[in-house]
Image: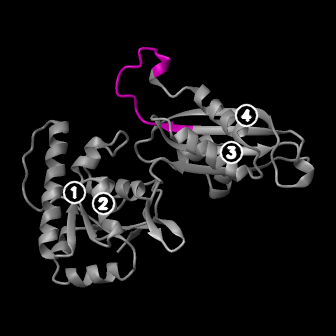
Amino acid sequence: MMTDTELAFAHPEARAEASGSGNPRDRISLRDHLVEADIGAFQQERGHKQRLRFNVVVEVRPVDAPLADDVDRILSYDRITESIAAELAAERLNLLETLAERVADRILAEPAAMRVFIRIEKLDVGPYALGVEIVRSRAERPVQRAGLDGDEAVHPLVVYLDNATIAAPDLSARLDALQAQGLPLILTVGLPDLPRPQTGHRPTQRRIDLLAIEQNAWSLAARDARCVVVATRTEIDWAMKRGQTVVWAPSKLVLDAVDGPQGAAPVTLALWLAEAMSATALLLHGNVTAPAGSRVPVKSL
């Protein structure tokens, strides 16, 4: 396993692999792509082109049909180089950071792109390379709400409640404490402590398990009137903007997602939602653990 220091200086491909989940996505990469551009904040950099080196790794969603050796079914490498060229041609920029953000936004606009790692280096500023590296995800587009200084991002707190916590007599007090943190609150639950049909067929069993989780969500809502069960991203956004305590019914979002979680393991679903919502953290109640590779902080309570 690479150390944090080794990862900091590793190629974006290594960073992508190290930060991946238990179900890693396919990746395509562009290595050592050299272009010349007029860029830089200092006067001596203006009017003089300098070499930039790009290393880009893009994680892509799985292809849902046979490739048939058809280039139109994949994210083409040309789309990466075209994104770089288009942003360099749009206007002169002072900062590599700005360029990296704009290239990332353009790449993530591609339907297949789910996460992108970008490193840009200036090669002509001295006997060394200076650069920036960013990671951006399609999931990292938080809800926006109106603030005093314009729209501001909303980063909710996602909480997984085990059945013992749901049934505990101090449930309302626990919800009070969570609400006191002043963050939009999304509650997730697991499977109920009840027998459920067993089909021996993974796709149908997954749907049964998701519906059982939703039954548990309604059971939680029945215990505290503040809890509102919601199923879609639009409903979640609407409820968070109005300060409601959300209980997530996962079936629709999970089954509709092009890059959703596999199976119906409740904590895996909670982590996926936390990442999709750009959550401040995922809090876990009960004797459970989250899968490795989380892109949001995970805390056990």
Which badge, 3 or 1, is on the more N-terminal residue? Answer: 3
In the rendered structure, which segment of residues is drawn in magenta? 58-72
- Which element type, helix, strand or loop, lies under badge 2? helix
- Which element type, helix, strand or loop, lies under badge 3? strand
Locate residue 223, reporting x and y percent.
13, 75
Of residues 190 and 120, the one drawn nearer to the viewer in this rendering: 120
Q: Quadrant of the rendered structure where residue 89 is?
A: top right
Asked if one can make out residue 10 in the rendered structure from this viewpoint, the answer is no
Q: Which tag is nearer the camera, tag 2 or tag 3? A: 2
Q: Is residue 298 magenta?
A: no
Locate residue 277, reporting x and y percent.
40, 58
Which badge, 4 or 2, is on the more N-terminal residue? Answer: 4
Q: Is residue 61 magenta?
A: yes
- Which element type, helix, strand or loop, lies under badge 1? loop
What residue type is disc 4 on?
Asp
Report the disc number at residue 32.
Answer: 4
| Residue that label 1 marks | 249
Q: Which tag is nearer the camera, tag 1 or tag 4? A: 1
Q: Which tag is nearer the camera, tag 4 or tag 2? A: 2
Q: How far is disc 1 from disc 2 in space, using C-alphas?
A: 10 Å
